[in-house]
Image (cartoon, rainbow, N blue to C red):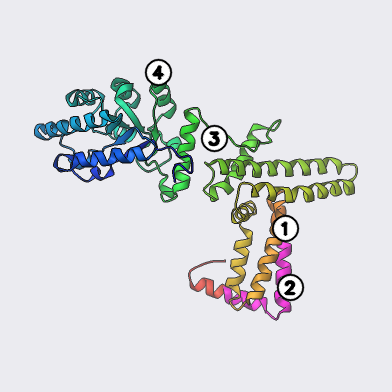
Amino acid sequence: MADSLGIRVGAVAMSGFYAQDLTKKNTYLELIDDCMDTMDKMGGTRVAFLPLGGCGNDWPSDKAKRKEIVRRLHQIGERAKARGKVIGIDTPLDARENLKLLKEIKSDGIAIFYKLQTAIDYGRDICRDMQTLGARNICAIHASNTDGRWLRNDSLIDLPAIRKTLDQMGWKGWLFVERSRDVNMVRNVKMNFGANVFYLREVFGRPVEAQVKLNSEGRDADYVNTILGRAQKATDELSLTYTLQGLNARNIIANRYFQLNDIYAERDSLAKTDRERANAIADSKLYRSHFAFDADLSLWLKPHEVERVKDVMTFDVVKVTYDAQCDMIPTLTDEEKTQILAWLKEARELAIDAESSKKKHEVFGKYKGRINNYLARRGYDLTKEREEWYKRVKARGGTL
């Protein structure tokens, strides 16, 4: 599957040793061989991560345990070296102590799988620690912290400084994102890891570039940033902002806002001399461009995602109004619900092209009136329905 998607595997982790003690696992060499066989099958991966968490926290000072860890890591390292591989370990030690440990192990098949979180937990200067350790002793880097916030928002990780340090060291290798999830959306895998990888690529010189050009040339920078923020609300909702797909969708949405602004600016200018002609030209341009917006989004988004973009751009009025109607009149038939939803979506199509939030709400207001007239013709006493609805909402502790 990895081959079919063009995915390269940077490292294999022997995660079982987070819980199992390396010094007490009699089959450790068999497990190492199994790991390296897997690395070969995964495209010849060179690095494996061997955590020492199962050994406890006292092994660096426990002479007997440390001696056994060193003995086993030497064996493991020589086995890995013979197969052209490196086993990376993460320890609680600082750079100088890690250098001493590596000297004790005496195998080029063992290196440090450097973990930013470990350095932060022990209050170390990451850049200085890595420089002391040296490029040849770092086989890979866990470029993340504990959960709480994204990398770009983490004041404890100065990623540009880390990149500069690694460049000065001449280090090359894989960066791995392990955690650094936003605590407010910890289960949103796509958003969290997408955001962190996006930032890593941004800092390390391989940024994700949209194929859809942002039509921002000649526009005020503050205005452009405001529009980008507005457009990003939609891609945030879809958990796509920090992806190529989301970047292109965001630019399409932002470009639509720019286009609407241009159409209405031209209308207002022409209206100074001929209001009727100005409105006709604006209506023509709105009509022609309206369907192009859907078509452009459909190149990057699925139909239900395009629907969600439209809802975000119109403040979720469709859902809020539809849910309110169904809650107010529990006896609505399926036919009536279908008609109400159809009219609200029709209103949304017009509201998307409106020039301001006020105008968007005015469009929905007209359709709400149409819905009320429709329900009245079908025999509903809306005043009575609303009064009863108010009582039910109040009884369950809500407000209207």
Which is nearer the eye, 116 or 224?
A: 116
Pair 2/3: label in front: 3
**Sooner in the amino-acid sequence: mark 3 or mark 1:** 3
- What label sits on residue 373 in the rendered view? 2
Evaluate if marks 3 and 1 touch, with contact meaning CB atoms under 8 Å apart. no
Could you tell me which secondary element the residue under label 1 belongs to? helix
Could you tell me which secondary element the residue under label 2 belongs to? helix
Q: Position of residue 372 (x, y in %)?
A: 70, 71
| Mark 3 neighbour density, 10 Å: few (under 14) some (14–19) many (20 or more) | some
Name of the residue lying farthest toward the top: 168
Q: CA distance from mark 3 to mark 1?
A: 39 Å
Q: Position of residue 213 (x, y in %)?
A: 66, 36
| Mark 1 neighbour density, 10 Å: few (under 14) some (14–19) many (20 or more) | some
| Mark 4 neighbour density, 10 Å: few (under 14) some (14–19) many (20 or more) | few
Query: At label 4, which amino acid type do we have?
Result: Gln
**Sooner in the amino-acid sequence: mark 4 or mark 3:** 4
For the image shown, how many numbered marks are present on the structure? 4
- What label sits on residue 9 in the rendered view? none
Magenta span: predominant SS is helix
Could you tell me which secondary element the residue under label 4 belongs to? helix
Can the viewer see residue 364?
no
- What label sits on residue 168 in the rendered view? 4
325, above or below 252, in the image: below
Residue shown at 48% from the left, 69% from the top: 397
Q: CA distance from mark 2 to mark 4?
A: 73 Å
Q: CA distance from mark 2 to mark 3?
A: 51 Å
